[in-house]
Image (tube, rainbow, N blue to C red):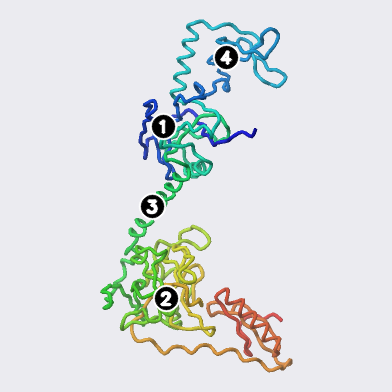
Amino acid sequence: MKKATIALLVICTAVFAQQKSTGTFTDSRDKKKYKTVNIGGLTWMAENLSYNAKGSEECPDVTSNLSMDDSKSIRCKKNNSINGVCINVKCITLKEDSDFQNYCEEYRNLTAKEIQDRDKRVKEKCAKEGRRYSNLPNNNVCPAGWHLPNDKEWNILREAIRNSTDEYDFESVSSFRLVDIGSVRCVQGKSSEEAIAEAEKKVAAEKEIAEKAEVEKATGKQFNPKINYGSMTDARDKTTYKTVKIGSQTWMAENLNYNANGSKCYKGKDYYCKKDGRLYDWETAKTACPAGWHLPTKGEWTTLENTVGGSSAAKTKLITASGWLESGSEKPINGTDDFGFSAVSAGSSGLDGKDYSPSAKDSWWWSASEGSSKIGYGYRISNLIGSFSGTRTSLYNVRCVQGEAPKEEEPAAPATAPANNPSKTMYCVSYVTGKPVSCMELKDTQDGKKFCDTQNKSMKMMLGEAKLTETKPSINCSK
């Protein structure tokens, strides 16, 4: 018959650390009081169970540590047979049989004093280490309102104490093993399923509280104290924003937080709106700015970038001094915010406000410009800085610029099909953030146009584009 298994905790002798989040519980069956501790949202007994349940052994198996003097019975050689068991004896000569099992070849009977001393040691050991129980997990020896932990609960414990042990008021966790007999630690709750559901709820609530506290602590702290900011008040909801003049432009120095229909907070949580402003789809963003302000065009974003020294300088000079992480890692990125633009790492969302991107690694803002493919243009700050084209239903932040909106740039006209002139040389040039990065020399044929169209579709995935031109670019072109 296959043995039933349960995860058991083997505790090594050590000194308890300073207790944190501990309590006590009294077993109504024998009035024994146990220390308890909350780990990973679960409340555990911080001591092994010692209730004298039916089928329990008096104490942990001392013979496994060769403390044979403390055993009541010893396997020994009797009448030339080593299958017998001797009661209350002291082993003098310990040997192994052909199966490498210990037995006593020579022994003597214990005195009454030795039996008394042994029983005292056993009692002390039991009080410290609890009893051992068999037929686990079918034998639920835990008190009412507590249960034997299942594998998932042991995994929760392992993860919670991965880099620490006694700070959770366990002595020292040496190993976890699967056996059907051993010491028992009980978990509070009628069943594992209820306890885990409650633990997950508790952990989520604690995580939410910590996340909210961290965001609220950072709210309003992004501004550069060396900058003399202006201010404006949105007449629609009386929200006041800091403003800053950069070159010939006056910008809001923080993201718009106007609750336009369809706008959302990052992760749907209000406290992110207070820190980072709201997220808008492109159609909503175009009309979200208050009177006297407007959503910047692609050209106005480029003007801002050029004013602060170009894209290489912008990714440092426009962002806050803290709160950013390097894309692809957790390494902090420190900005200088020299111009008071005070860009915070606010994150974004995918289509229809789903699949939020990490808030600490990117900021994305809409522009009023529209690309040739009927998609919105925007501006992005991260390791890759510059313009991008995004799906209209994605949600990004909004920064407003003071004044009337300039005449919208005409969408780029679709490339006309070249004449079928194999003798004429054309160039398919790929651009990223408006700068040429590669070039392919082609002939003025339909096949050449199709190649460049395919290249353009590939570049869109990298927030770039490819154009077919007669003018030879300033970079080397392959054939």
What separation in Å lies between label 3 and label 2 (alpha carbons)? 43 Å
Residue 213 is left or right of residue 137, and the answer is left
The quadrant holding residue 33 is: top left
Q: Which residue is mark 3?
A: 205
Task: Label 3: state its secondary structure.
Answer: helix
The residue beneath circle 1 is: 16
| Front in this rendered view, residue 180 or 264 | 180
Among the 4 quarters of the image, the one containing residue 110:
top right
Mark 1 and mark 2 lie on one chain; the one further toward the N terminus is 1
Q: Give the amino acid at mark 4.
A: Ser
Which dot, 4 or 1, sits closer to the camera? Answer: 4
Mark 3 or mark 1, which is nearer the start of the sequence?
Answer: 1
Mark whose residue sits in front, 1 or 2? 1
Q: N-terminal of the two: label 4 or label 1?
A: 1
Q: Report x, y in % for residue 80.
A: 71, 8
Q: CA distance from mark 4 to mark 3?
A: 53 Å
Camera-side mark, 3 or 2:
3
Q: CA distance from mark 2 to mark 4?
A: 86 Å
Considering the numbered disc 2 on the image, is that residue within a helix, a strand or a loop?
loop
Q: Let me know if residue 309 appears in the view.
A: yes
| Three-letter residue code for mark 2 | Val
Is 59 on the left-hand or right-hand side of 224?
right
Relative to 91, does residue 159 appear above or below in the rendering? below
Nearer to us: label 1 or label 3: 3
Disc ID at residue 73? 4
Circle 2 crowding by C-alpha within 10 Å: few under 14, some 14–19, many from 20: some
